[in-house]
Image (cartoon, grey):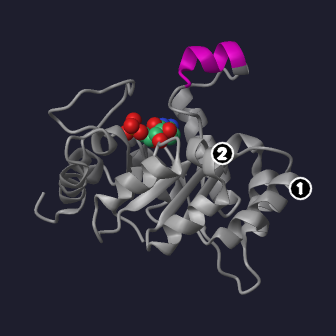
């Protein structure tokens, strides 16, 4: 595992998703299934994509009392995904309970990563709405450390934070980074962006890429370019 491009399949239906994946004719990109597709099509969608041979990041961002999260994770573990996630804001106890629920009787489990602060939350919103008055980057690092203490495998973070997360939590602690754009493309609604090559340079373990691939005229070519820029030893 590690150093791969995860394609965010932000589609509203099975039909759209399958039409998109069919374009890859036999190639198997690592895919991210988020709330929209999961709530629309349910666990069967995950099983179907799995059966086609894709690795899956199930991005449902759980956040509830530890007992509820433990039980929800024990349902998700049977979907046999590669990575799933939760909110670090749910506390260390919740993250520990999640790991318990996710671990199968034979000791295997999907990787579990935490959302620290959403990249849509800025310093002003954090202070105004959440009453958290520390600097945002300190809060992100504290939440990442909590995730590491709880035994999680890594965090979702902005590519600009990945280097510092590795410095604080260790090189083996995974950083999964959205907010990726090609150098010659529009930023859309993403504010803090990096190219795949830059994300590689700062040490991201996985990049999550949505619209630059899903909305491209040729998604397969865009995916190949992304993989090339992010993983090519020569870059
Ligand atoms: O289309 P785009 O490349 O911006 O998609 C990025 C994907 O990563 C989306 O699925 C979005 O929900 C997700 N994401 C993000 N920022 C986060 C967490 C997840 O953009 N902090």
Q: Nearer the viewer, mark 1 or mark 2?
A: 2
Of all residues shown, which one is farthest toward the right? 67
Q: Which mark is residue 157?
A: none
Q: Secondary structure at mark 2?
A: helix
Q: Is residue 204 visible?
A: no
Q: Could you classify mark 2 by the number of other residues whose Cα lies within 10 Å: few (under 14), some (14-19), or many (20 or more)? A: few
Q: Residue at x 44, y 58 (%)?
A: 31
Prevailing secondary structure of the magenta residues: helix
Q: Is residue 100 visible?
A: yes
Q: Which residue is mark 1?
A: 67
- Residue 3 on the magenta segment: no
Rendered position, 107 above or below 198: below
Where residue 222 sits: x, y (%)? 21, 49
Q: Which residue is mark 2?
A: 39
Q: Pointers 1 and 2 in contact (CB under 8 A)?
A: no
Left or right: 10 as drawn, with respect to 181? right
Rendered position, 159 above or below 96: above
Q: Residue at x 81, y 44 (%)?
A: 64
Residue segment shown in magenta = 121-129
Q: Secondary structure at mark 1?
A: helix
- Residue 125 on the magenta segment: yes
Q: Residue at x 69, y 69 (%)?
A: 77
Where residue 214 sits: x, y (%)? 33, 44
Where residue 35 sits: x, y (%)? 61, 44
Question: Viewer-proximal residue, 188 or 26?
Answer: 26
Where residue 228 sits: x, y (%)? 18, 59
């Amino acid at each position: 595992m590690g150093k791969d491009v995860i394609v965010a399949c932000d589609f509203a239906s099975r039909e759209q998703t399958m039409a998109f994946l069919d374009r890859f004719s036999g190639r198997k990109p690592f895919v991210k299934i988020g709330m929209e597709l999961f709530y629309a099509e349910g666990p069967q969608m995950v099983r179907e994509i799995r059966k086609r041979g894709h690795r899956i990041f199930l991005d449902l961002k759980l956040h509830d009392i530890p007992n509820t999260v433990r039980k929800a994770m024990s349902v998700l573990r049977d979907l046999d995904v590669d990575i799933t996630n939760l909110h670090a804001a749910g506390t260390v106890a919740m993250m520990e309970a999640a790991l318990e629920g996710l671990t199968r009787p034979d000791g295997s489990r999907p990787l579990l990563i935490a959302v620290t602060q959403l990249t849509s939350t800025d310093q002003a919103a954090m202070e105004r709405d959440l009453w958290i008055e520390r600097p945002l980057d300190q809060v992100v690092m504290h939440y990442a450390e909590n995730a590491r203490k709880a035994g999680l495998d890594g965090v979702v973070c902005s590519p600009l934070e990945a280097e510092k997360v590795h410095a604080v939590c260790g090189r083996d602690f995974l950083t999964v980074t959205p907010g990726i754009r090609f150098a010659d493309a529009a930023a859309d609604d993403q504010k803090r962006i990096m190219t795949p090559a830059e994300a590689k340079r700062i040490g991201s373990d996985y990049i999550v890429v949505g619209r630059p691939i899903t909305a491209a005229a040729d998604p397969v070519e865009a995916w190949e370019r992304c993989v090339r820029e992010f993983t090519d030893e020569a870059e």
